[in-house]
Image (cartoon, grey):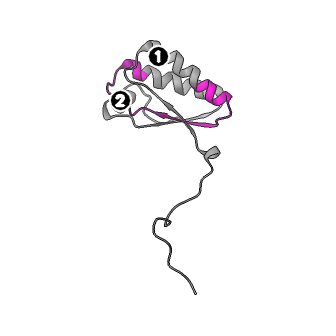
Amino acid sequence: MSSAPRAGLIGVEATDPAEQPAVLVVPDPLTFADVPLLCERLRGLYGGGAREVVCDLAALTRADLAAVEAVARLRLTARRAGGRLRMRGAGAGLVALLELAGLGAEAP
């Protein structure tokens, strides 16, 4: 005899919070002076044991060269630390600027 699944439990996958990637939120407004601090925070996440970090760009309201610099430096910092960095939440303007600068494709 089988019972029907209870409402609210369908499709729920148990996850271990320790396996969730760390998140680095890029603040708005962002200036060139903020980039070294973001890189320092990213190094700290990797130094604390994170293997993968999600860089949340959703707060950025302006696509400018400071944002491009931040993405480029954060990717370089991740590569040097041997970690993985994923970008999420980038607006269309920032995506276009990153493509123009040759930084549009995610690093392997």
Q: Which residue is mark 2?
A: 94
Residue 57: x and y in percent read 42, 32
Q: Which residues are magenta?
A: 42-68
Q: Amino acid at mark 2?
A: Leu
Which residue is at 46% across, 22% downward? Answer: 70
Q: Which mark is residue 18?
A: none
Q: Position of residue 42 (x, y in %)?
A: 58, 26
Asked whether 30 or 14 is in front, the reply is 14
Name the residue located 44 percent from the left edge and 20 percent from the top edge. Answer: 69
| 32 lies above or below 42 | above
Which comes sooner in the sequence, label 1 or label 2?
A: 1
Viewer-nearest of discs 1 and 2: 1
Q: Quadrant of the N terminus?
A: bottom right
Q: Is residue 80 left or right of residue 107?
A: right
Is residue 49 rendered magenta in the image? yes
Give the quarter of the figure containing the C terminus: top right
Mark 1, residue position: 34
The residue that appears at 68% across and 27% down in the rendered structure is 47
Q: Amino acid at mark 1?
A: Asp
| Mark 2 neighbour density, 10 Å: few (under 14) some (14–19) many (20 or more) | many
Are circles 1 and 2 on residues that touch, CB within 8 Å? Answer: no
Residue 5, given in percent of the width and then of the height, sits at: 50, 74
- Which residue lies at the image location 63% right of the left edge and 50% below the top edge? 16
| 16 with respect to 28 (left or right) | right
Would residue 89 be counted in the magenta stretch? no
* Residue located farthest toward the bottom when viewing the structure as drawn: 1
Please give the count of numbered marks on the rendered protein. Answer: 2
